[in-house]
Amino acid sequence: MIRMQNGLIALGLLVVLAVLHLWSLAPPDPRPSHAPAEVFSAERAAADIARIAAEPRVVGSSANREARTYLKARLAELGAEVDESGPSDRISVVSDGQLIFGTTLENVVGRFRASPSSVGAETGALLVMAHHDTISMSRGASDNAMGIAVALEAMRAITQAPLERDIVLLFTDGEEEGLLGAREFFDNHPWADDIALAINIDSRGNAGPVRMVQTSEQNASLVSLYARSVASPHANAVIDLFGSSSPNITDLGVPLGLGIPSMNFAALGGIFDYHSTTDTPANLSPASVQDMGEQLLGVLSEASSAKDLGVAGRASFFDVFGLFLVHYPAGLDWLTLAIGWVLLIAGGFWSIRRSEMAWKELLVAMPVQILVLIFACLAAFGIATAMGANQDMTDPFTGREYLINWHWAVIPTVLVVLAMCVLPMAIFPSMRRAWWTSGLILVGLAGSVLQVASPGSAYFLAIPFTAGAAALSYASRMGAPSGQPSLPIMLIAAFIAGLVLVPVIAAYHTLIGLVFAPVTAVFIVMLIWTLQPAGNTSSSRQIWLPASLGAAAAILAVTLVLTTNHSQRHPSATDILFIQNEGQGYWASRYPEPDDWSRQLLGDDPRALDFSVKPYGPKTDLYGVEASTVLEAPVEVSYQEQAPGPGPSSDTIIALSIVSRAEGFRVWFKLDGLPNETRAQLNGNALDIALKDNALFLDYQAVPLSGLNFTLRMPTADEDPVLRLDMTSAIPGLPVSSAHAIPDLPADKMPIADRFDSWATIWKAEFELAEAREGTGGP
């Protein structure tokens, strides 16, 4: 009975730690607009957010242009030196020289100069980055009007006193298209060489605390800077590892790749509003805005006088309930692991010597524990899949499922994993010391491997491992009854392990949700392995505890699956397109079975269409019906051929012009019939192309109103080549016309927002360029 009570008390302590951690995640109250001038006010920043996030700001669109004009005016109002270099063409050749990828974009850049008397003015500038563009159907309040507004309000506050160091605000364009604006700045802007520290703000949610989610490889000085400048820090090296493993998902990947000291801040709560039509100012948490602003203002103030930015050295770090940040050299985790291994070996030796464990039992327990881990991951994946959370992993066209109860799924996941970990001890209680020891061995091995792969990230395994090994060693040395340590020792081990691992579990569940539920399950298993004596309920076979845990998990999981649905706050995604192919209009979708709303446009049984969206790449299956309306082509194509000059080596030169009649169009094309030796220029830029099968491909986002001008130079042949152009033009949104009225979307439906060619108007055409010779034509 005492053993059962001790175990339940230890598990109860973990629950208390989890509750305290969740309580600590509440961001600070937003400050009003009448707050003192030198402090950050979320209410003041809200005006910028509302103005910037009034509508989607796709690259090249009129809304994008209007946002840039507003931001330039705001920078000038705050006293910045505003860069007026204008738009630029970002052109690259990919796919072994066959595909030209281009975008016309424009960053907004302002520089705040340090006071002439400042001693830090010559030590490099601080850079604050936030992108101003959005995906096609999202207003982007959190992604990333919030980041821009926070930067503006923080600069207003910090400039109430003379600056000690130059600060550059960079509002990038084309981030959603592949960090294009950031690459353009660091490749070509004269201020890029002055940057001493880059700070990126780019959220993946619209609520919850703001976390420092990514730092440079050599981050010791930056972590120390963060610890002393932020009152309520939320950061750990495990989230930093996640960010570092995907360096090119935010603009920070560009300065990181150049070796510039860098920090990334993001709000991660409310992840289902990310890249969604529900990412609006009304749904954005003012408290999260306040938290981001206070952290940025604190870091900028401290970094302005710091002399050690980017000093070599890597840190291991984690916050304790948002009260303070524990940080130390990453190499100390090796010492922690070494101590843990010594204690584990000693505990194993004493256990064997006292006949509390046999070598054969340990060898049996190890593979069983690995099987427990595998089944725990499968159970977590099963719960997530049953709720529909993995749908967009298996079908990239279906969009994200916006489940109102997704966060509760962590409870049955914890229960079922706990049941699986306790089950071996309930069935084979005589091996309880082997179960504990084998679990600790696996945690220690995982920690050691992670420390080799990513120094500084293994603390969340090294510290619980050592705490568990110390408890095992103590219980073995003192000859604890039934192999279970005393309650004080168990509580100390549970407190240390839970203090470190519980925040990691909560953070990862917030960051990646149910889509990668097995990762959360792995962390839970690691925590339980370090404290496995908590499951020792008896020296006899009693499976009531794992059976009860499993039954509770099943009841909760079934309840969640049955109640999985959508709401006005988190609607389900629907997909509809208007496609005009060779003069014939179609209402179309990627779904063969339309939902109730799209059935009003597609009918009950849309047929499979024999064309795809793009003229190259994998075929997109489309289902649709003919529409009666014909739209005017948005793009004009003109073609001129220059006859070869005298001499055997003269080339034939072809001038191809593509002009858009409106802003914001994207063009894809395939040009067939070119000799593989063809050379090309686009808007005066020489292209390093390498044709195969006589075809050239283009993907150009934000075709400028001035047009795209190709110059193709090809060897002269006895017969003129027959050039065929297969072109697609697209713009977000459905056509507005009284001839084809679109029914209003119900409250529980929304457009797919994270694809340019979903919920779009698309024109397709294929013709020989000779038809456009000395004239115009097009899709």
Image (cartoon, rainbow, N blue to C red):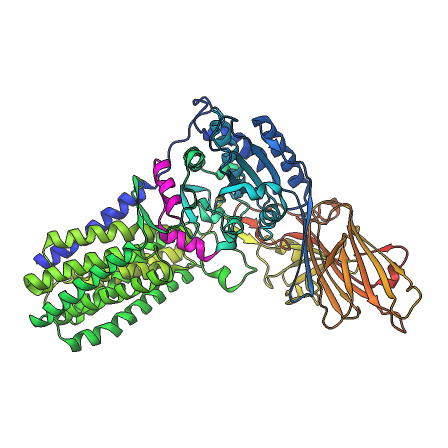
Residue found at x 41% / y 31% = 30
Report the number of numbered marks. 0
Image quarter in which the C terminus is found: bottom right
Q: Is residue 285 visible?
A: yes
Q: Where residue 249 sits in the image (x, y, percent)?
A: 51, 53
Image quarter in which the N terminus is found: bottom left
In the figure, is residue 46 to the left or right of 620? left
Q: Nearer the viewer, residue 121 or 718?
A: 121
Q: Where residue 553 sits in the image (x, y, percent)?
A: 29, 59
Task: Answer above or below: position of 110 versus 748.
Answer: above
Residue found at x 11% / y 51% = 488
Residue found at x 12% / y 69% = 349
In the figure, is residue 562 to the left or right of 635? left
Q: Nearer the viewer, residue 362 or 350?
A: 350
Residue 206 magenta-drawn?
no
Residues in magenta, as a range: 219-246
Q: Nearer the viewer, residue 117 or 333?
A: 117
Q: Is residue 480 visible?
A: no
Q: Quadrant of residue 672?
A: bottom right
* Main secondary structure type of the part rendered in magenta: helix
In the figure, is residue 735 to the left or right of 47? right
Q: Where residue 24 sits in the image (x, y, percent)?
A: 31, 40
Task: Answer above or below: position of 357 versus 204.
Answer: below
Task: Answer above or below: position of 557 versus 29.
Answer: below
Q: Where residue 63 sits in the image (x, y, percent)?
A: 65, 40
Residue 225 magenta-drawn?
yes
Q: Nearer the viewer, residue 653 or 534?
A: 653
Instruction: Name the outermost residue toward the bottom.
Output: 360
